[in-house]
Image: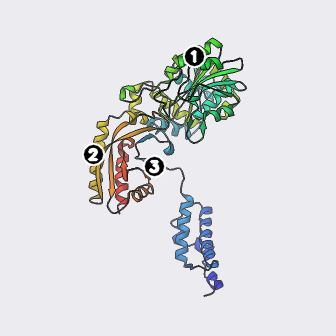
């Protein structure tokens, strides 16, 4: 059969669109996407014919290809996953899981109009800052507060508001990179402040700051090492000493605290991490932190500090560009309200609950999960449990080994990489951890309903 005859056998697009095996399965897919998929399926066969390759012009085969293409086009990109990795604040998987009350608050606000910038009592325009400011000042002891869309934005706004056109002094040991693109030198450059580095990578003394202060100094900046630690022969200047130096020279002091800790977690076996209240009580003029790390809320940047500083930042041109939307504000407000009762926050804020769940309780859940996998999957897997460590993740508590017990799963006859890929391709996807050729399921980052989802995912993967 020559090429032209082969091309004449190609099914027509309009005919394919009327077929039951396309119209039926794709009834919920937008018509434009179905049309694109059908055209692409036909063109794919045409291209193979013109290239001299074997190509099937059977209408059933082309229709099946079109359905597959249309489904791929219609599939959502941002979908829920089950985090079985044991990394609690998993940056790639959306960081902190919101408390159910925060989810409900965001959904309720999303469903209609709201008091985003409306004062009900006065019957006139209000400010979106009021929704979280009183809560933040109560929880931290600060004079004033505001929130923007992430901590990088909070740092940028703070630097621009306090040191644009002037010098900001920072220790060389604190020129950190957080994530793939947030570097203190870069963000300082964008803010319009001139960076002045002092000290050495491992040691910086108060005298180093003192010598660098001049009439051009606009800010003393301290960056908490929330995602790394310099250990051994090291030293840094305490925040109270830096505040005293700033007061001596009339220079404001800003601390980027990063993790957003609101309550002391050291009583739960976690490393001592300074809280926002600690920084406020030390006298910092401005403290910035994330809302979606150890605070356990939505993505947000928290700014607390002196009233004059915060009021000026609220009026800064960047503040509007960096402001929070109504959904984030609703979730953040409710999350902060939970902290008014710390014991309640430990139970209801998922990040805190996962960080502080006793190791014995996790071990019991791991044993139960292993038994459930054995019962559902029979002899398909070798299933054991093993002691391991979970991680805080999200650039927080870098030295914290959080004791856990993992379920170790091996599918007989199949490599661990292939098994992990099958779980990841499921609906919902289950994201597990591979370590030393073992597939690990960590119950610490699973809710109880998700345990059943993992069991079912493993059952399907074994088929």
Q: Is residue 402 left or right of residue 106?
A: left
Callout in the foreground (3, 1): 1
Q: Residue at x 59, y 60 (%)?
A: 30
Who is closer to the viewer here, 307 or 105?
307
* Count of marks overlaid on the render: 3
Question: Which residue in the structure is indicated by mark 3?
Answer: 81
Tell me which residue sits at (43%, 41%) in the image: 87
Task: Answer left or right for 356 relative to 173.
Answer: left
Q: Secondary structure at mark 3?
A: loop
The residue at 61%/33% (across/down) is: 184
Q: CA distance from mark 3 to mark 2?
A: 23 Å
Nearer the observer, disc 1 or disc 2?
1
Side of 60 where 210 appears, left or right: right
Around disc 3, counting alpha carbons within 10 Å, would you say few (fewer than 14), some (14 to 19), or many (20 or more)?
A: some
From the top left corner, tell me how far across and down residue 76 is, in percent. Answer: 54, 54
In the displayed structure, 97 sits above or below 220; it is below
Q: Quadrant of the N terminus?
A: bottom right
Q: Does 449 appear above or below 145?
A: below
Q: In this orientation, does residue 283 appear? A: no
Residue 145 place in picture, x, y as percent: 58, 23
Identify the residue under disc 1. Answer: 243
Look at the image and tell me in which quarter the C terminus lies: bottom left
Which residue matches tag 2? Answer: 367
User: Mark 3, mark 2: which one is toward the viewer?
Assistant: 2
Residue lying furthest bottom: 1
């Amino acid at each position: 059969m020559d090429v032209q005859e082969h091309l004449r056998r190609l099914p027509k697009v309009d005919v394919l669109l009327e077929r039951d095996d396309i119209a039926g399965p794709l009834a919920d897919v937008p018509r434009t996407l179905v049309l694109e998929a059908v055209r692409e399926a036909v063109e794919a066969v045409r291209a193979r014919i013109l290239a001299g390759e074997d190509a099937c012009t059977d209408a059933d085969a082309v229709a099946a290809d079109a359905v597959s293409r249309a489904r791929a086009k219609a599939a959502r990109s941002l979908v829920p996953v089950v985090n079985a990795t044991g990394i609690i604040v998993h940056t790639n998987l959306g960081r902190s899981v919101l408390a159910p009350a925060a989810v409900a608050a965001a959904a309720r606000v999303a469903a209609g109009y709201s008091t985003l910038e409306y004062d009900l009592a006065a019957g006139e325009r209000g400010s979106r800052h009021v929704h979280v400011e009183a809560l933040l000042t109560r929880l931290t002891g600060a004079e004033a507060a505001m929130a923007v869309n992430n901590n990088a934005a909070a740092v940028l706004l703070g630097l621009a508001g306090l040191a644009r056109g002037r010098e900001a002094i920072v220790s060389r040991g604190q020129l950190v990179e957080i994530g793939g693109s947030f570097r203190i030198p870069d963000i300082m450059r964008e803010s319009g402040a001139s960076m002045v580095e002092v000290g050495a990578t491992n040691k910086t003394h108060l005298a180093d700051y003192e010598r660098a202060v001049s009439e051009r100094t606009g800010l003393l900046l301290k960056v908490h090492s929330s995602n790394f630690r310099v250990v051994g022969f090291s030293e840094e200047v305490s925040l109270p000493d830096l505040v005293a130096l700033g007061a001596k020279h009339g220079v404001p002091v800003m601390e980027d605290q990063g993790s957003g800790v609101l309550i002391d977690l050291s009583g739960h076996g976690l490393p001592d991490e300074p809280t926002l209240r600690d920084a406020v009580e030390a006298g910092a003029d401005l403290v910035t932190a994330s809302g979606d790390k150890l605070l356990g809320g939505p993505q947000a940047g928290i700014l607390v500090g002196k009233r004059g500083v915060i009021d000026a930042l609220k009026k800064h041109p960047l503040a509007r560009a960096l402001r929070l939307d109504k959904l984030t504000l609703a979730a953040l407000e409710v999350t902060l309200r939970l902290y008014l009762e710390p014991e309640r926050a430990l139970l209801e804020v998922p990040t805190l609950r996962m960080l502080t769940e006793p190791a014995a309780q996790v071990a019991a859940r791991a044993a139960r999960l292993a038994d459930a996998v054995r019962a559902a999957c029979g002899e398909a897997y070798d299933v054991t449990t093993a002691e391991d460590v979970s991680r805080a993740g999200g650039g927080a508590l870098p030295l914290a080994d959080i004791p856990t017990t993992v379920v170790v799963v091996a599918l007989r006859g199949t490599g661990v990489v292939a098994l992990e890929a099958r779980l990841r391709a499921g609906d919902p996807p289950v994201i597990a951890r591979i370590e030393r050729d073992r597939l690990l399921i960590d119950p610490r980052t699973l809710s109880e309903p998700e345990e059943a989802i993992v069991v079912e995912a493993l059952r399907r993967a074994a088929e």
